[in-house]
Image: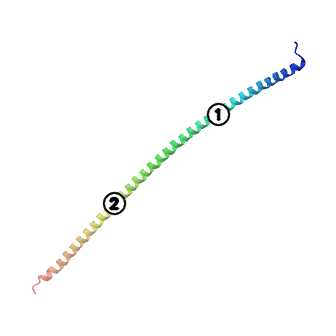
Amino acid sequence: MTPSGNETAPLRLVAQFLKQLRHRVHLLLLLILLQLLLMVLLLLLLLLQLVLILILLKLLLLLLLMLLLLLLLMLLLLLLFLILLLLLLFLLLLLLLLLLLLLLLLLFILLLLVLLLLLPQCFKWN
């Protein structure tokens, strides 16, 4: 039996469909590969974002440490200022004591002068 023209037409259609399907399968595989590539790129971008976040966290930690050191320095300067203020008050107190001693000395000299002036009059034998 020889194939007639009517029997070969469906075979041609099946062959053409298989050929188109093969091209579509290649395109589908290519699209899957492109999607995998995009997923890998997205994962790399996420990894890069995580690295950048870690760098930012380290920078923030360093900034916090610098702020704490600055606060400590300010507290030390305040302590130094208070010590200097206490020294100044102590010096003022010493100055007041010296002035008081000077005043007492002047009063003593004045008292001696008054006594020296009054003493001859007390011993007059008139």
**Taking 56 as reference, is 27 left or right?**
right
> Residue tagged by mark 2?
86
Q: Amino acid at mark 1?
A: Met
Look at 41% across and 53% down and name the residue there. 75
**Taking 14 as reference, is 101 left or right?**
left
Q: Position of residue 112 (x, y in %)?
A: 19, 75
Look at 34% across and 60% down and name the residue there. 86
> Residue tagged by mark 1?
39
Give the residue furthest to the left. 125
Q: Nearer the viewer, residue 31 or 116?
A: 31
Q: Amino acid at mark 2?
A: Leu
Query: Is the residue 34 above or below the residue 85 in the image?
Result: above
Query: Is the residue 123 above or below the residue 76 in the image?
Result: below
Which badge, 1 or 2, is on the more N-terminal residue? 1
Give the residue furthest to the right. 5
Query: Is the residue 88 above or below the residue 21 in the image?
Result: below
Q: Position of residue 50 (x, y in %)?
A: 56, 39
Q: Nearer the viewer, residue 33 or 4?
A: 4
Q: Position of residue 81 (x, y in %)?
A: 38, 57
Q: Residues within 10 Å of mark 1 (few under 14, many from 20)?
A: few
Q: Position of residue 76 (x, y in %)?
A: 39, 52
| SS of the residue under disc 1 | helix
| SS of the residue under disc 2 | helix
Look at 51% across and 45% down and name the residue there. 60
| Quadrant in the rendering for residue 124 | bottom left
**Which quadrant of the figure contains the C terminus?**
bottom left
Comparing labels 1 and 2, the label whose residue is closer to the camera: 1
